[in-house]
Image (cartoon, rainbow, N blue to C red):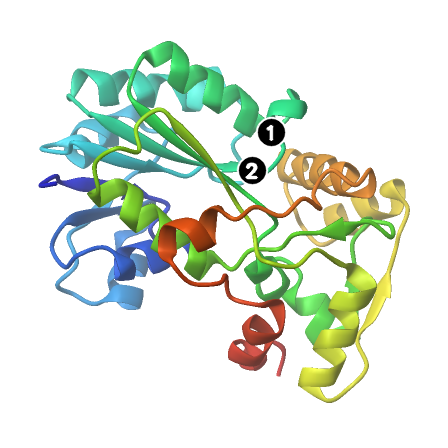
Amino acid sequence: MNSRILVTGAGGNVGRELMRALPPGSARAADISPATIIQALGSDIDAVRFDFGDPTTYAPALENISRLFLLRPPAITDIPRYITPFLQAAKRAGVQQIVFLSIQGVENNKQVPHYKIEQAIRAAEIPYTFLRCGFFMQNLATTHRDEIRERHVIDVPAGKSRTSFVDVRDIAAFASVVLTEAGHEGKVYTLTGSQALDYYQVADIMSDVLGHPITYKDPSIPKFIIHQRKAGRPWGMTMVMTMLYTITRFGNASSISDDVQNLLGRPPISFRQFVEDHQSAWA
C-alpha cells in the first residue's frame, strides 16, 4: 500500500516509536514543536508544526496525506471544539483512513474523551481503525516517574485490581502494520500485554530490577486529585486520569487480548523487560 501518513503527537512516547517503526520517508511527523521531533528523530524527518487549537496548522499538516494516526493530547477534553474541526479538515483533504489511539474498555465508559472521539470519527464517515490500548507501561517512566525516582512509591488509586499493561513499542509496531497494510479499515483491536498485574506486583518487579524497594501506595480518589493538582497537572488531565484509575479499581482494565500476538507474530513485551529497558528513567 502506497500512502503518505500523518502522525499526530509525534513528539510523544507512542508517536516517536511509530515514526521509527514506519518505513523511512513514508510519514510526516506533526507536533506543536517540530524542533522537539527533529531533536528526537533526526533532521531528515518531515516535521510540521501542528496544534489542534490552531486551525491554520491543519492544511499544511494534511497536504498530500492519505492516512492519519490520531492521538489525543492529554489536556484536550473538549472534543467538539478541538477534534471535530480537524476531522472535518481531514475529510476535505481526502484522508482515506484514521487510526485512532483509543483505550481498552472505552465502549463501556462513555464519559472519557476517547469514546467521544470514536463517535466523532464514525460521524465523519472516514474509514477508521481503532486501537483500544491497555495502560501504557511507559506511564510509569513519564507521568509517574518522579514519585518513583524521588520517593520510591507508586501513588495511584487503582486498588487491588489488575491491569493489562502494554508497551508503547508494541503499540507502535501494531499501528505501523495497520497503516501500511490493506484490510484493517473498520476494525477495532484491543492491545494489551500478556499479563494482568496489580500494582503490588508492579512494585515488586520494579523493586527486584532496580535493586531497591518500590512501594505501592493506594491513595483515595480525593487524595490523588489533590496530589496531581499540587504537582501542576491541568484540571482536565487530572480528571481523565482519575476516571481511568477508577475504571481500573472496578476491574475493567484487566482483560488480556491476543491481538498483538496474532498480528505481530510474537509475544508482547513483558513488564519485566520494560523495566529492564528503562532503568535509567528512575536512576
Q: Are marks 1 and 2 in contact (CB under 8 Å)?
A: yes
In this rendering, the answer to whether 65 lies above or below 170 is: above
Residue most extreme to the right: 220
Residue most extreme to the bottom: 211
Query: Quick one: quadrant of the N terminus?
Result: top left
| Residue 236 on image: x %, y % | 64, 33
Query: Disc 2 designates what residue?
Result: 103
Q: Relative to 189, is 147 on the left or the right?
A: right
Q: Residue at x 24, y 32 (%)?
A: 57
Give neighbour class at mark 1: few <14, some 14-19, many 20+ (Cα, 10 Å): many
Q: Residue at x 16, y 21 (%)?
A: 93
Task: Give the amino acid at mark 2.
Answer: Ile
- Report the disc number at residue 106: 1
Task: Give the amino acid at mark 1.
Answer: Val
| Residue 60 on image: x %, y % | 15, 33
In this rendering, the answer to whether 117 lies above or below 234 is: above
| Residue 92 on image: x %, y % | 18, 16
Q: Nearer the viewer, residue 188 or 115?
A: 188
- Corner quadrant of residue 70: top left
Q: Is residue 99 visible?
A: yes
- Report the disc number at residue 182: none
Q: Nearer the viewer, residue 266 or 158?
A: 266
| Residue 127 on image: x %, y % | 29, 22
